[in-house]
Amino acid sequence: MLIWTRCQLVLHSSRRLSLIAALLVTGWTVGCDSTNRAGKPGESQASGGPPFTLAAASSLANLMDDALKTWNAQNSGRGQATYASSSTLARQIEQGAPVDLYVSANQAWMDHLAARGLIDVTSRRNLTHNTLVLIQPRGSPEHTLTVASDRPPPALSGLWSTGDPRHVPVGSYARDALGSLGWWEELRPRLISASDARGALRLVERNEVDWGIVYQTDARMSDAVRVAARLPAETHDPIVYPAALTPSQHPHARAFLDWLSGPEGHELLRANGFPSFPSTALAQP
């Protein structure tokens, strides 16, 4: 697994795209090292020993960047992060990627690792939850959309995007929601699948598709899209983000998870648009 800092990815556009494509082809995760002001990823820190590695769903990137920045400023134990779809990260952990803490965008991929003995089930807990929204580029004609009909509204006639429903949580939730509404079979042929939730958001932001289904927290952070409708929660499984330590038992990873589950972590969740669970809410399968 390669953890690549954001500052290292600030290249000319064509070179950046070529680099990212090459990394994805080889199965590496393009992520964010939240300690990228102090040495290379994986390098031991002067006062706290080796950093711990957090692997988190892409929809949590802003939240976890903020959390690690705060945590690293307060503690000698340093943390760094990598972001991708929950499925990609889970498969990398299966293949031996050096991850100390995993946060998924659904229970299924956490269950997948638990069944293989790759997480500490006693540490598993629900951190937060989310909502599905239907978004459109901000410059497109505005439409009032309703989700009560058994046919998609005419405004949803073009190409659209969400995460790949076969393995990306946001896409699985979207497929289930559209299936419950009776829209899936009509809309499926026009789906442009993205590799993760943020990828779907970017396609809508760049007007490469006419609309998309993403998490409310992702839509909230973008000035280039607007929320056209919210999908009813009863049309899909609850969108829950479970977290768990891996068998590495990195002490700073455990301390960070406990901190993130406590009052300061809950404040950061709310600041980033996420609701919080009680710190005692475990997520046992």
Image (cartoon, rainbow, N blue to C red):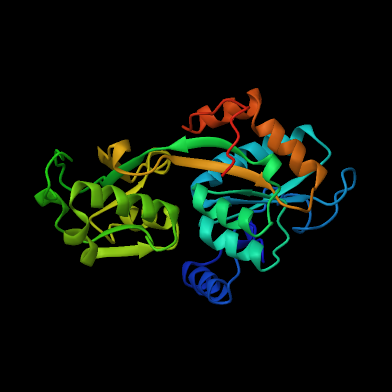
For image coordinates 55% across by 47% down, the residue present is 61
Q: Nearest the camera: 230 or 178? A: 178
For image coordinates 65% across by 25% down, the residue present is 264
Q: Look at the picture and state if 146 lies above or below 277.
A: below
47 lies left or right of 150: right
| Location of residue 242 in the rendering, given as x and y in whole percent from the top left corner | 56, 42
* Residue closest to the far top: 263
Quarter of the image with the N terminus in it: bottom right
For image coordinates 16% across by 42% down, the residue present is 142
| Location of residue 195 in the rendering, given as x and y in whole percent from the top left corner | 44, 63
Q: Nearest the camera: 241 or 121? A: 121
Image quarter of residue 172 = bottom left
Q: Look at the picture and state if 128 lies above or below 118.
A: above
Q: How many marks?
A: 0
Residue 91 appearing in the image: yes
Q: Look at the picture and state if 33 lies above or below 190.
A: above
212 lies left or right of 258: left
Q: Look at the picture and state if 59 lies above or below 112.
A: above
| Location of residue 238 in the rendering, given as x and y in whole percent from the top left corner | 41, 39
| Location of residue 179 in the rendering, given as x and y in whole percent from the top left corner | 24, 52
For image coordinates 50% across by 57% down, the residue present is 85
Quarter of the image with the C terminus in it: top right
Image quarter of residue 82 = bottom right
5 lies left or right of 214: right
Residue 30 appearing in the image: no
